Image (cartoon, helix red, strand yellow):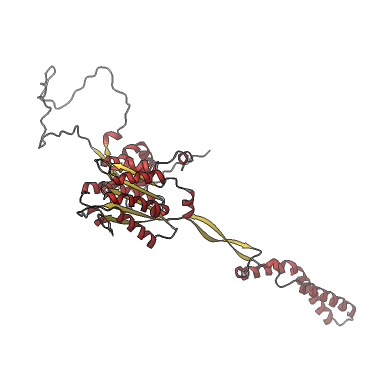
Amino acid sequence: MAHFIDRRLNSKGKSTVNRQRFLRRYKQQIKRAVSDAVGQRSVTDLETGEQISIPSRDIKEPVFHTGKGGQRTVVHPGNDQFTAGDKIERPPSGGGQGQGEGEASDSGEGQDEFSFSISKDEYLDLLFDDLALPNLKKNQFDKVVQYETYRAGYQTDGVPSNLDIVRSLKGSVARRIALSGSDKRALREKEEQLEALKADKHDNSLAILELEKEIAELKAKIARVPFIDTFDLRFKNYDKKAIPTSKAVMFCLMDVSGSMDQATKDMAKRFYILLYLFLTRTYENVEVVYIRHHTQAKEVDEQEFFYSQETGGTIVSSALKLMDEIIKERYVDTDWNIYAAQASDGDNWADDSPQCKQILMKELLPVTRYFAYIEITERQHQSLWREYQQVENSCENFVCKHIQSVSDIFPVFRELFKKSEQSAAAGG
């Protein structure tokens, strides 16, 4: 068995092997730092990795060394203050008097931090370790399977439109050379002999007749070899292979009425960032559609989505109706995988909540891979939550979760997308 050690240097001159060993050893500390850094990103920011800082004490390792035993006499030069037997007074209570300015900190002992950069791929691997897209119904997977036609060589039969003329003629030439090559050489030799006999002054009439007979037989044999035969025909062969769809669209729906303060929006933003980053791990292209609503819904850009605030009441069904219109207008093709995340503080007009349930079950969920509703509130749930819980009990691709603080976001997200026991056992 051969062992290969990768000693290639990365761009900063450090061993790639040592870097991977470091990431594995301090994985938990790095994952915590990565989770804390999510809120500082834009939803669609995937161009760079992340600058990570972890406490230096977390990366310290015990060091074993041999101490100097026994009694030792050491002479330190330059001592002009003490002699043997002097007693040193205890420092005043409260510790030494440093030269720094300001008051003492009440946050415990200070600690240095170790900072380093991780790449985009390392950032995503650490952020979404042990997560997977949820298992859905088989018919939902069937809807998103694409087939790609590709050339699969040649075959000896097919329709005339697929006939490859050049390849067929090459086969014809090869066949005629194989069947009549030796006869043509023999024909040339006998024709040369015939010319030599005719040029001879002696009487060679019998030999000439014999050669002419043999030449005629060779020509007839060569002529019986057809210019092209059905055996030479080659038709282009095409086959289909299933390919996974690489396009996904993520709908972000959020209440921007007066009851949604900026802190609540920031918590919703963190959840949207996690969902977007997670989808990019599965799909090559992910589009994001932002829909904000109060009593009316509107498609907006990211800046207005997170930082615009309105006053007045809330009608959640307006956002669901707008989402349905956008899907039918731009994403009706089965090539698209549709995901949605809705954030709200739970406020809604009581008569509108049953309508939201009907829109979800009849229009949106049949065409949506996964729909997640997060309610960010500390008060008691209202009618919208109760209606959505009924939807959750009836539909596998819908889930609603409750978030009270920033610390709840990542655990809730991991619970939504944690790997099933079957996929974990299969290594997927």
Residue 153 at x, y percent in the picture: 60, 61
- Nearest the viewer among 102 and 43 is 43
Residue 15 visible? The answer is: no
* Residue 300 falls in image quadrant: bottom left
Residue 216 at x, y percent in the picture: 82, 76
Residue 118 at x, y percent in the picture: 33, 46
Q: Residue at x 22, y 19 (%)?
A: 73
Residue 403 at x, y percent in the picture: 29, 42
- Nearest the viewer among 311 and 99 is 311
- Nearest the viewer among 216 and 70 is 216
Q: How many marks?
A: 0
Residue 208 visible? The answer is: yes
Q: Is residue 394 left or right of residue 253?
A: right
* Residue 192 falls in image quadrant: bottom right
Q: Is residue 53 left or right of residue 22?
A: left
Q: Residue furthest front?
A: 351
- Nearest the viewer among 306 and 9 is 306
Q: Residue at x 32, y 24 (%)?
A: 66
